Image: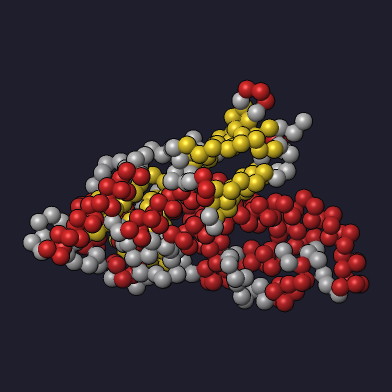
């Protein structure tokens, strides 16, 4: 079974260098490895000093590069997916449907990149796929999209055919608009299956892992903590933290020693927060990470652990449990989450959890449909929601 490693972090922390080092280390082990850039600001070619592009390019034994172009993927590999998204709007989006072959619907660029990663994994050609993601905000948008979109498609599809069959004549006569037809509904069904398969791969800890890259500075530390919380909220397996650009000791400069004192404080803070994860320290090198030799030097200095590609990860997240008195509990890990930041809404078929500007809908099992929330608590980074089944 192949594996996928997603490398992400705030912009400018060196995540592309860390992703490149992962790929080189993997290839040196004789594992056929593909390094993918899912960041529209591609720079894999700059790091390896080669011409990369929208097709797979082998640059060394067992090592290939690919810089994803979602627009090219939409037109050449997944045109039906774009049509299905356009058809969600019926003919209120008639103009949208007409241009679906040529133009991408805004906001769905990431979906085509994820579908390509899924297909490359399924091909079985690569033992490891390393993904250099965009900065964390975009990565969170990328990773939550399949679940969010599948939620809407799932809610629409069961009644969609009946509603469109009943309302289509009325819509044409009164509003001069078309609703999605039967073929459009079939396309939505295929889209839903694609989204489910994406989630099955990305959330399986035996297949996919997320790794965070940070540097010891206040703003980056805060964003790294939030990203870890949100990734846990969406149930993505995070297994390593890399702290990059650590200054050496005894620099001989008062200015640099002052910065080393600041870095030491934030390194301790990161290590105190990420107690459950291996924390890898990467020194600040005196030269740029450019060229294969520089990347190999980074591997030798910081990525030499034998278990780099075989680390354990917690799987006890998003668990329902039946308690005494007929009450059930749902536990979700949100490390660093504070009670005042969390809002919970229990609807007929879902539990909605909002943390600041992120919200996730978790489906309720059949026995808890229509349940009401009796209370909730957050303790040691774990949110527990208590639910009373409908009488």
**Image quadrant where residue 260 sits:** bottom left
Q: Quadrant of residue 237?
A: top left
Q: Nearer the viewer, residue 215 or 45?
A: 215
Q: Residue at x 49, y 51 (%)?
A: 230
Tell me what residue is drawn at x 45 percent, y 69 percent: 40
Residue at 12 percent of width and 63 percent of height: 254
| Residue 28 seen in this snapshot | no
Residue at screen point 41% across, 39% down: 313
Task: In this rendered view, identify the residue nearer to me: 244 or 346.
Answer: 346
Q: Position of residue 259 (x, y in %)?
A: 20, 60
Please identify the quadrant where the N terminus is shown. top left
Q: Position of residue 160 (x, y in %)?
A: 79, 56
Q: Is residue 358 left or right of residue 293?
A: right
Q: Nearer the viewer, residue 261 or 88?
A: 261
| Left/right of residue 342 with respect to residue 1 in the rendered view | right
Task: Report which quarter residue 51 is drawn in.
Answer: bottom left
Residue 149 at x, y percent in the picture:
63, 56
Furthest residue in direction left, as rendered: 252
Q: Does any portion of residue 135 appear in the rendered image?
A: yes
Quarter containing the C terminus: top right
């Amino acid at each position: 079974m192949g594996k996928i490693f997603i490398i992400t972090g705030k912009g400018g922390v060196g995540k592309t260098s860390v992703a490149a080092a992962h790929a080189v280390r993997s290839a040196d082990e004789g594992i056929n490895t593909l390094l993918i850039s899912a960041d529209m600001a591609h720079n894999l070619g700059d790091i390896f000093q080669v011409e990369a592009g929208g097709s797979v390019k082998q640059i060394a034994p067992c090592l290939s590069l690919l810089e994803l172009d979602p627009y090219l993927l939409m037109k050449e590999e997944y045109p039906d997916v774009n049509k299905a998204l356009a058809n969600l709007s019926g003919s209120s989006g008639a103009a949208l449907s007409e241009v679906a072959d040529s133009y991408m619907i805004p906001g769905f660029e990431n979906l085509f990149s994820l579908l390509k990663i899924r297909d490359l994994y399924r091909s079985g050609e690569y033992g490891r796929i390393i993904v250099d993601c965009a900065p964390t905000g975009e990565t969170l948008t990328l990773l939550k999209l399949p679940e969010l979109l599948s939620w809407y498609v799932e809610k629409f599809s069961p009644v969609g055919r009946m509603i469109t069959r009943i309302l289509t004549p009325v819509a044409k006569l009164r509003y001069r608009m078309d609703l999605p037809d039967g073929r459009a509904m079939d396309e939505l069904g295929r889209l839903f299956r694609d989204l489910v398969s994406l989630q099955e791969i990305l959330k399986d800890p035996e297949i996919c892992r997320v790794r965070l890259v940070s540097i010891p500075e206040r703003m980056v530390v805060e964003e790294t903590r939030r990203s870890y919380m949100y990734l846990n909220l969406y149930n993505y397996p995070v297994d390593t933290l890399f702290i990059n650009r650590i200054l050496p000791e005894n620099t001989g400069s008062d200015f640099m020693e002052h910065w080393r004192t600041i870095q030491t404080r934030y390194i301790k803070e990161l290590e105190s927060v990420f107690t459950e994860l291996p924390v890898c320290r990467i020194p600040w090198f005196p030269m740029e990470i450019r060229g294969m030799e520089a990347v190999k030097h980074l591997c030798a200095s910081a990525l030499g652990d034998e278990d780099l590609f075989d680390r354990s990860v917690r799987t006890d997240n998003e668990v329902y449990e039946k308690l005494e008195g007929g009450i059930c509990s749902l536990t979700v890990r949100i490390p660093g989450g504070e009670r005042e930041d969390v809002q919970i809404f229990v609807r007929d078929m879902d539990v909605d959890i909002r943390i600041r500007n992120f919200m996730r809908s978790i489906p309720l099992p059949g026995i808890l449909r229509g349940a009401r929330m009796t209370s909730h608590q957050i303790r040691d980074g774990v949110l527990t929601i208590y639910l009373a089944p409908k009488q």
